[in-house]
Image: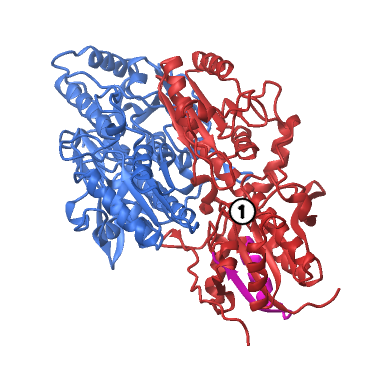
Chain colours: A red, B blue
């Protein structure tokens, strides 16, 4: 492969996760150690940092401090939700990006995010190819939603899944102690794909789980659901329900919208969800007269570094490292992903590359064959899939028994002479 | 002291915590090993288990399984919220309790709970004294609310505080990544005492904390608060607020009630709170136009065994053990509590006994001198108090990287021949 010398940019985008920084650190550390990469630049707030020439020099960070990134949740470089225009319609942003790439002699671009970020990554890759600017572009996946095309799983999913399973086990214990009964509704993230909600099934596997689990992969019928909860509650005086924020009726209407007439939309046109647990709790209270608690796991589920899966952390780091190693070796226009294999029955995670074009904006859902026949739980297929991913306790460094997260100096980058 | 031979009953009551079972296990294990205690009975669902003769024989549990109690959250014996009548008005329940005590030759009664449970414990103690039935009664404190009179702190508080501080640190990282700004409101438990909310200050101490912290110890002014948030948000494009569920205006009206006309009341006549984070988030969104997230920590904060403080676990165990040891030694009508000292600057926790009469229904609030001058944060006094309590990582046993909680056989007790 042809050798390409120049600077690299690393940016993070989309909703953060417990391990997105492990990936960024994997890329940054590997890039800093590679002689072909002359300067390692961090884009503050993703692609916006490129557009605004808001770049920091990662080489100016104390390496010991930088190492804390591996265990720090959220996006240490800052994130954004900014959708690049179709370059055939408006190429203003792309020209600006090219201008910045030339200014710093950027020959490597690594973008760390989910579906929308892979779309951004793909568009930039294709623009640079089209315009003959030699720059290797690699996507580094991240999403607790676990819905990226191709890859066996996404960095960040397992840590969120572990947090959810653990919390459900604890909430199960908490919500079933009173003899006068309780119905509990827990809401997990996941707009169109139910991976996170499915993680509640790991709590069932471990012995303390939900009675009912509803994913957005299937239509949700509020009346049938209400009857099912009533039946369970009348038998055992308790019922623990876990729902995805994205559950919807057969007409595609989100159940969360039953309660609020006008839900806001975000920059990508996605409906902003929330309040589902609260809506269902009120609904079930009225329907049953029982004591009902609605719990929304909200941001907690995606930033819970303290209970992250060490497997997830190491794989995330490996994904960032592989992006740099492959780019330096001549690969471009790909997303790093995972392929699983089993050696003597033991789970092994291998790096595999996917075309950015295939990945961008394609969502991977929970296979229907892993959902049980009554549509309110998961079967062993999902457990076999998810269990290996959540193994290992995080090595999160602590001071005074509280997390010690990274504190970047964020020194403004200057182009090399 | 006179020797007293007979059975003991251990019951748990009130809202569960991450470590209430560590206390129960401390009492059960110690009682099982003591020759004066002829039978160790567990009351299912607290005092209701006594009234209903719903007792299990703890000696019939596998000791290895029982040991999992130390790290299992919530009340393994079940809980209740049942207020005993004033015995001068209606002594029906007390007569029934005495009947059960006689049936099983119960000579030791250990009750594990918070304010209301100490009230129950105190009433039973006084009734037995008045009626000349020789039975030693000891309260074993538990409450994440940390509001029990006398004791330096309560078992359960530190683990909840550690969870809150850790979660706030993570949410701080998560909620500040976007360049287009965010206001985040986190709601903690604590009706009249702000101990749990104050724990957010530990996150500030560790470097990633809230901008504003509001306790119910002070009156809350919604307009002044709104202006303060606006000011912070306009400066730094982010604002993280932590509030107690119990914040109220100068007329004593709960802020959570601003949003809902009629809040329900529980069996003790306490107003059932909730929805405050959601109310404040909507309010701030309207006032600022910013993106706002409301997060209610809900049950998660009181059952998070996975991030419990090992100091809290060991102290909770010690409290249960001390209740049994002291009772067997002849003490009665007391609650076990803690007194702190420092040896060469190192925190030491000592057992101290308090009169049940003094403890019952008295609430201990956060000292006003630990609240900052602007009434929206804590000072070093609180950090010095709380930091030693959260030290040490839980030794929670795991299987497949998920918690392994206790599974009691719950063998129905029979009176000894």
User: Would you say residue A216 is visible in this rendering?
Assistant: yes
In the image, taking residue A83 as reference, residue B137 lies left or right, namely left
Count of numbered tags: 1
Mark 1 lies on a secondary structure that is loop
| Residue B151 lies within the magenta run | no
- Which sits in the foreground, A52 or B102? A52
Location of the C terminus of chain B by quadrant is top left
Crowd class of label 1 (few under 14; some 14 to 19; many from 20; radius 10 Å): few
In the image, taking residue A63 as reference, residue B127 lies left or right, namely left
- Which sits in the foreground, A63 or B256? B256
Residue at x 49% of width, y 63% of height: A405
- Residue that numbered label 1 is attached to: A83
- Residue A399, position in %: x, y? 44, 64
Residue at x 24% of width, y 59% of height: B381
User: Would you say residue A175 is visible in this rendering?
Assistant: no
Task: In the rendered view, tell whether residue A231 sits above or below residue B174.
Answer: above
- Residue B60, position in %: x, y? 49, 27
Where residue A52 sits, quadrant-wise, is bottom right
User: Which stretch is magenta?
Assistant: A23-44
- Residue B404, position in %: x, y? 56, 40
Task: In the rendered view, tell whether residue A345 sits above or below residue A71.
Answer: above
In the image, taking residue A201 as reference, residue B297 lies left or right, namely left
| Residue A37 lies within the magenta run | yes
Residue at x 70% of width, y 42% of height: A363
- Which sits in the foreground, A402 or A242? A242
Location of the N terminus of chain B by quadrant is top left
């Amino acid at each position: 492969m042809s050798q390409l010398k120049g600077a690299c940019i690393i940016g993070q985008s989309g909703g953060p996760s417990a391990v997105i920084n492990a990936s960024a650190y994997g890329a940054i550390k590997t890039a800093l150690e590679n002689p072909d990469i002359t300067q390692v630049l961090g884009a503050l707030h993703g692609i916006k940092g490129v557009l605004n020439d808001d770049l920091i020099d990662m080489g100016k960070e104390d390496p010991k401090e930088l190492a804390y990134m591996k265990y720090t949740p959220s996006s240490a470089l800052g994130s954004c939700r900014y959708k690049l225009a179709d370059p055939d319609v408006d190429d203003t942003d792309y020209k600006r990006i090219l201008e910045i790439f030339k200014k710093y002699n950027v020959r490597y671009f690594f973008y760390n995010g989910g579906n929308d970020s892979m779309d951004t990554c793909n568009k930039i890759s294709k623009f640079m190819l089209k315009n003959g600017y030699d720059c290797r572009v690699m996507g580094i996946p991240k999403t607790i939603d676990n819905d990226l095309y191709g890859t066996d799983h996404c960095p960040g999913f397992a840590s969120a899944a572990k947090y959810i399973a653990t919390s459900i086990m604890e909430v199960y214990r908490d919500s079933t102690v009173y003899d006068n009964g309780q119905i509990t509704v827990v809401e997990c993230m996941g707009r169109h794909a139910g991976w996170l909600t499915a993680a509640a099934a790991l709590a069932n596997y471990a012995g303390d789980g939900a009675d009912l689990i509803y994913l957005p992969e299937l239509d949700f019928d509020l009346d049938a659901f209400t009857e099912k909860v009533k039946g369970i509650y009348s038998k055992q005086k308790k019922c623990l329900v876990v729902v995805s924020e994205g559950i919807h009726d057969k007409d595609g209407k989100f159940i969360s919208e039953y309660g609020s007439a006008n839900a806001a939309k975000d920059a990508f046109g996605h409906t902003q969800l929330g309040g589902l647990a609260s809506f269902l709790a009120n609904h079930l209270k009225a329907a049953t007269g029982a004591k009902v608690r609605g719990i929304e796991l909200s941001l907690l589920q995606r930033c819970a570094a303290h209970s992250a899966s060490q497997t997830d952390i190491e794989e995330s780091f490996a994904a960032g490292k592989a992006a740099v190693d492959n780019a330096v070796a001549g690969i471009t226009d790909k997303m790093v992903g995972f392929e699983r294999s089993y050696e003597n029955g033991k789970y092994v995670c291998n790096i595999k590359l996917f075309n950015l074009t295939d990945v961008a904006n394609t969502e991977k859902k929970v296979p229907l064959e892993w959902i049980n026949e009554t549509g309110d739980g998961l079967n062993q297929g999902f457990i076999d899939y998810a269990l290996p991913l959540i193994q290992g306790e995080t090595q999160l460094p602590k001071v005074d028994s509280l997390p010690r997260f990274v504190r970047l100096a964020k020194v403004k980058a200057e182009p090399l002479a």
